[in-house]
Image (tube, rainbow, N blue to C red):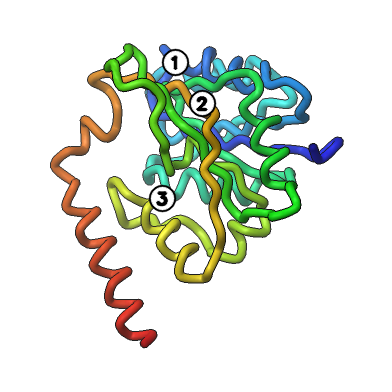
Amino acid sequence: MSGDALVSVILPVRDGEAFLPEAIDTVLAQTGVRVEVIVVEDGSRDASAAIARGYGPPVRCMSIEPRGLGHARNLGLEAAGGEYVTFLDVDDLWPPDRLAVQLDAIDARATPDLVFGHELRLPSDGAGPRPARNTTTVLLRRSTYERVGPFPTEWHVGEFLDWLLRAQELGLTTTMLPNVACYRRVHGGNLTIRARGDYGDYAKILGRALARRRAGR
């Protein structure tokens, strides 16, 4: 593992006071890893900012006008001081060895650019852990993010899919670990449930990726 390497965890939140303490605690409970938590409070009307600021270092809080996940993640990454970066949705949790396991993988001899893991849904849907390529299961170097460029800000959903497709077009490599990297809490407030009307964004993202590939032939 990368010794004293620092992992920056970007945690966007909007009106997430019910989940935020557990989310921060799950990062601070990571074993064998130095972390910083950058909470990007995206226009909350509740006590999210006060909760985050109450922790003190290594937790920092940035309060911004509400402009969506892509913008919040980009600002968090600009403020990040770690060589490695990852993300946490406010209603999700991590096992305590998640970052240590992924750091070992990203520094292995056959070094991948992006390391993913499995997610386990809570409450259980009976399916068990499943491979997940999303922001809450990925670990990458900050230099990898800078190579691909910032997250798009025009989408209501799918900004990471857009970013990942661009990463693949650049030839970046990925690996999927068998370990559980995220406990994903499923509830009525999940963005993917609330934003079902915006699922057309995925089709537009895939269409743009296809157009780029055709133009590059």
Instruction: Say left or right for 140 vs 46.
Output: right
Quadrant of the rendered image containing residue 201:
bottom left
Quadrant of the rendered image containing residue 165:
bottom left
Q: Which residue is identified by label 2?
A: 180
Res 90 visible: yes
Instruction: Specify the amino acid type for callout 3.
Output: Phe
Secondary structure beneath dot 3 equals helix
Q: Residue furthest left?
A: 197
Q: Which residue is identified by label 3?
A: 160
> Residue 213: image x %, image y %?
34, 77
Quadrant of the rendered image containing residue 147:
bottom right
Instruction: Specify the amino acid type for callout 1.
Output: Phe
Which residue is at 42% across, 36% downward? 131
Instruction: Specify the amino acid type for callout 2.
Output: Val
Question: Which dot marks residue 19?
Answer: 1
Quarter of the rendering occupied by the C terminus: bottom left
Which residue is at 64% across, 37% downward? 102
Quarter of the rendering occupied by the N terminus: top right
Residue 182 vertical placement versus 206 (above, below) = above
